[in-house]
Image (spheres, coloured by chain):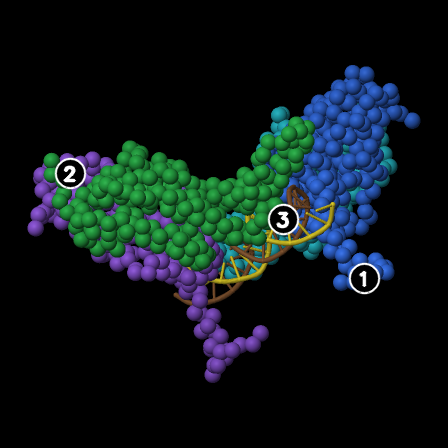
Chain colours: A blue, B cyan, C purple, D green, E brown, F yellow
Amino acid sequence: MNADQPSSCPVKTLIQSVGRHRQRRKAERPQELLEAALTLFTEKGFAGTRTEEVAKLAGVSKGTLYLYYPSKEELFKAVVRTYLTAVIRESHDIIGRYEGHTGDLIRDLALNWWERVGSGKPSGLLLPILNEAHHFPDIVQFYVDEVVKPSHALIIAALDRGVTRGEFRPVNTESVVHALIAPIQYLVLYRHCESVCAISPAPLEPMTFLATQMDLLLHGLLKQPTTP
Amino acid sequence: MNADQPSSCPVKTLIQSVGRHRQRRKAERPQELLEAALTLFTEKGFAGTRTEEVAKLAGVSKGTLYLYYPSKEELFKAVVRTYLTAVIRESHDIIGRYEGHTGDLIRDLALNWWERVGSGKPSGLLLPILNEAHHFPDIVQFYVDEVVKPSHALIIAALDRGVTRGEFRPVNTESVVHALIAPIQYLVLYRHCESVCAISPAPLEPMTFLATQMDLLLHGLLKQPTTP
Amino acid sequence: MNADQPSSCPVKTLIQSVGRHRQRRKAERPQELLEAALTLFTEKGFAGTRTEEVAKLAGVSKGTLYLYYPSKEELFKAVVRTYLTAVIRESHDIIGRYEGHTGDLIRDLALNWWERVGSGKPSGLLLPILNEAHHFPDIVQFYVDEVVKPSHALIIAALDRGVTRGEFRPVNTESVVHALIAPIQYLVLYRHCESVCAISPAPLEPMTFLATQMDLLLHGLLKQPTTP
Amino acid sequence: MNADQPSSCPVKTLIQSVGRHRQRRKAERPQELLEAALTLFTEKGFAGTRTEEVAKLAGVSKGTLYLYYPSKEELFKAVVRTYLTAVIRESHDIIGRYEGHTGDLIRDLALNWWERVGSGKPSGLLLPILNEAHHFPDIVQFYVDEVVKPSHALIIAALDRGVTRGEFRPVNTESVVHALIAPIQYLVLYRHCESVCAISPAPLEPMTFLATQMDLLLHGLLKQPTTP
DNA sequence: CATGAATGAGAGTTCATTCAT
DNA sequence: AATGAATGAACTCTCATTCAT
């Protein structure tokens, strides 16, 4: 109702305010729309998000959204592809030459992943993907192919390194993978829920939790558990 | 509420049994509706479930559903309350006097919980609850109060027992609680997703996974790790 | 905001007025809807007709229409099928045993067809079918199979009778068929347009036109043109 | 209007021709738009044609269309007016001095009209005009005044010539006019529909049909039908 | 003049909810 | 109590039209 920018010339202000909507910014629009969509999809799920809301949050009209994405479903897919692909890229960057103990490698991987990926918005897509999976078989496939499988492969590689170097007991890596993913997924969902309502009295501190988790799990993996 | 005393006259009994049957059905309506709703909500989520479907699955008409539950939201709440209460009751039953090592106690608790609770339908409510959290703040509160907190308390008690008895290293039990819950939650979601699409090439076997998980975690908790 | 019905008992009036809509008449609905749709489709074409208009004309709400027909397109198809099938049935009934001259038979067929079929509403579907044909390839197919082909067959049979009995010159019946249909189609379109706006100064009188037309055409077909 | 004089200086000519070309294009824009619109309106009807398509087919942008025509409806009107005027002009050109038998005159008129007018695109406007009549009362009026009435007058004149010269029986010319128009209209619609779907197994050959038709009708008009 | 990104009223369709039977 | 026909608000998507560039 009230324009809160101190302006000297009212007429000019009016013109500018008219000009504020109806800006031509073709290059930026897709990104802005994807960001708005990411925010709302993670907050409200797929079905719970109205296309008009997305448009509004991106600062455009309903119709503009459809100029860039032909349907709500395609918008969702674009969000998933865009942000989860970025996640994968980041994860791959993290792996590299690592000199030290594999236990430290895995803990660092986990903590790094949380800081740079898990704590961000895109990880919030997990919930809608799982919950509305039946609507989007191809999205699920994409998620499996692009997120789940690479993550598994990455972790298995790290575990194998530990076993090969004699640092870990020989374990069923297939199962241990899930063991390592579980706390991360737990954290993702936990955080997402926390944003809606403070769930636990003593709020879970992600990094501490993750460190503790990894220590516990890795302690169980060690060939020669450290004796004081 | 119940009137199932055997009658003396056969004919009258038949008539009554027909009448009773209708009465019985009437009395069972809410349960049948809740069961149908549970099935559909866990399969398709809240938004993805149509009230007509619920009614149909329960073998009644659309209007009848509204005779028992004033709205879809209330139906959902009733489902959550009913089945989570059952879950809690079951969970409490599992806990008992235990003579042996706390490590075994916890593993048994987890496996038992999975067999009697986690693998059942009601645990599938987790996803819709989290996903629609913003629509149902009171449901979330209920979930926290009735499921999360008691579970935490139970696990903490078990952990304390282990520390007190000198079986476990003194650890930050608050954090370890989450560590133990994580794989369980992971399993719940995994199973729910599996029904939509087989995610991993070698499908995860719940009991084995849980046992492995617990072993890993408990191994890390032990004061004197078992040496073969 | 203001209730403008002069009523003695406000409450009773309200109840009655509420009761007036919301009548349950499942059996009659489809017919009422089809009739409303027929009227509007012939008047405004397919694209020009709004589903809500159809519903309103049928005295029901928008949603009710979708209880009986899953989409606007299916409604249109149902209209075409229903009313054109009736047309065909009627046409077939007209043909029968005929004792007299084939020229008279054909004129009688045409006049009868006009009176009982052509002058009615359903013939007005021709325009939307032709005009929006590309939207409805199957409707066109249906129209061809169920209306065009049988009509052709019928007329050809009559012509053959005339040739066989030596009343007509041997002619290319394939082409004469179109000759006989042309004035009928002309009349259908003409009438449809007339209903919108009075097209010609001296309005065309259908029956006279048809009789004249048939006389002209049949005169050309006669083996021995009647000499006065 | 035309400025195609050869210039003396080659370079200057090139520059001018580029400039002229742009000017030419500018001057031709309305025509190009009308042509594109004609094509699409006849193919897809009024409602089925999108303004953007028209612009694209004319090789300009959406906005440019609105520079020349203030709305889709006005564009349609312009198309109808432009091309029907052309039709009328062509039709008038066809009429001339004719020495022979009026029967031949009329057949020649019809065949000529088909070849030079009827078989062209503009005749395809008939269907959309009739179908959208309620949207465009003034267009219908225009159509009646500029196409229907002159055509009638022309044909009546020809018929009167035949009657006056004693070649035709004295007939109700008013009605015969429609008789002669009917097969032509039939052909126009038939052709338009044929482009969507081949309606009859043995496709109608326009010129043959028209000749046969005219022969039939004229045969019926002759005072002394030709006897072999 | 020309462009094409942006707009938003409007149309088709769904579905939770109501209520006459 | 039970039914299911009827309702209409809400939502997705389209496209004629506008206007900043």
Camera-nearest residue between E13 and C126 = C126
Question: Is disc 1 in the same subunit as disc 2?
Answer: no
Q: Residue furthest bottom?
A: C8
Question: Is disc 1 in the same subunit as disc 3?
Answer: yes
Q: Are marks 1 and 2 in contact (CB under 8 Å)?
A: no
Tell me the distance, in whole angstroms, between the alpha carbons under discs 3 and 2.
Answer: 61 Å
Parent chain of label 2: C
Residue beneath disc 2: C160
Residue beneath disc 3: A63
Q: Are marks 3 and 2 in contact (CB under 8 Å)?
A: no
Point out residue C186 in the picture as x, y percentages from the top left corner: 30, 50
Few, some or many C-alpha atoms within 10 Å of disc 3 (few <14, some 14-19, many ≥20)?
few
Parent chain of label 3: A
Q: Is residue A121 above or below residue C196?
A: above
Q: Counting residues from the N terminus, which is met first, the one under dot 1 or under dot 3?
A: 1
Residue beneath disc 1: A10
Point out residue A205 in the picture as x, y percentages from the top left corner: 83, 42
Camera-nearest residue between F13 and B207 = F13
Parent chain of label 1: A
